[in-house]
Image: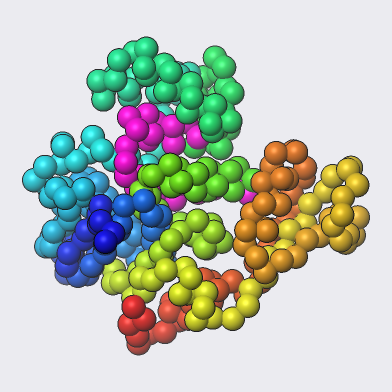
Amino acid sequence: MLKSIVSLDKVSKYYGAFAAVDSLDLAVNSGEIVGIIGHNGAGKTTTLKMSVGLIAPTSGRIAIMGEDIQKNGLKVKRGLGYLPEENALYENMTALEYLAFFADIYRIPRKEAARRGGELLDSLKLNAGKKFIGEMSKGMKRKVSIARTLIHDPDLLILDEPNSGLDPLTSFFIIDYLKKLREKGKTIILSAHNLFHVEYICDRVAIIKRGRLVVYDSMENIRRSLGRREFEIVFKTSEELNYPRRDGNYCFKTPAIEEMAALLRKILDNNWALIDLAIRQSALEDIYLDIMNDDKQMELK
């Protein structure tokens, strides 16, 4: 029997008469990735902030690793890592100095903190040396933020738009990195607007509309209920490859998400130029658009 590491029971958050989140039930099992998607203002960020104890629900109960987040927040927070959508960094520090600062908050010995920090930056392919954070690109800064979220080796990660505003290859690298963390036993809850990323890494997907949960199902079931979709990657390299060409570039099409991910990984590793990435008739995108356009809000769970 799967063990729920996160449980939201009839959770609501009201601001005056406005329900940002309305009677939300959500359970996340240990070792899975759950994606939360919805329109702007649907209640995604509010849900994540309540789950990490930053804001209190108006009603309902949130249990993290079996503990009430409001009653035992300090105990719970040592076992989770939270990444907000907007993350202010200390720009006059190097990446290693920044990670050491947060490791000290978690009372990690300095020698251990230095080892962990170096390993995290290597795994994220962030070779910034003595460069200050303020001198880094947006993608590099996001990698520093992710490393900070992981410095205390939490079992649960709650990530709000982890790849927001990043270029396609950096964005894919980060989402692929999260998939590898799941393979190491981490449990991950994330919000995202990029439905390809959600479809690629998530075991289950929650769709929220106007503060209410309207779908919570596995990606396998969502794909089964909808028609075919196709991915198209257009890229450029001077190497001779066995891919179809179009207008002087290589153009690869496939309905298989793993084949598409493998080629993106190859483009990233070889520093080829990604020209375009398109998704035709995405299963998740279809159901998402149908729900957003249906004012009846039919329950599909």
Question: Where does the image place residue 124, in percent across and percent down from the top left?
Answer: 54, 33
Q: Tell which residue pokes out farthest to the front in this image.
A: 1
Residue at (74% x, 38% y) in the render? 271
Nearest the eye: 5 or 246: 5
* Horizontal side of residue 213 vs 282, given as left or right: left
Task: Say whether residue 32 is left or right of residue 79.
Answer: right
Span of residues in magenta = 143-168
Q: Where residue 273 sits in the image (x, y, percent)?
A: 77, 45
Q: Nearer the viewer, residue 18 or 108?
A: 108
Residue 105: give x, y in percent of width and height. 26, 23
Q: In the rendered image, is residue 166 in sight?
A: no
Residue at 19 percent across and 70 percent down: it is: 23
Quadrant assignment, res 210: bottom left
Q: Residue at x 21, y 48 (%)?
A: 65
Residue furthest to the left in view is: 71
Nearest the camera: 129 or 225?
225
Q: Is residue 271 magenta?
A: no
Q: Is residue 277 visible?
A: yes
Quadrant of the frame with the N terminus: bottom left
The image position of residue 150, as x and y in percent, is 38, 34
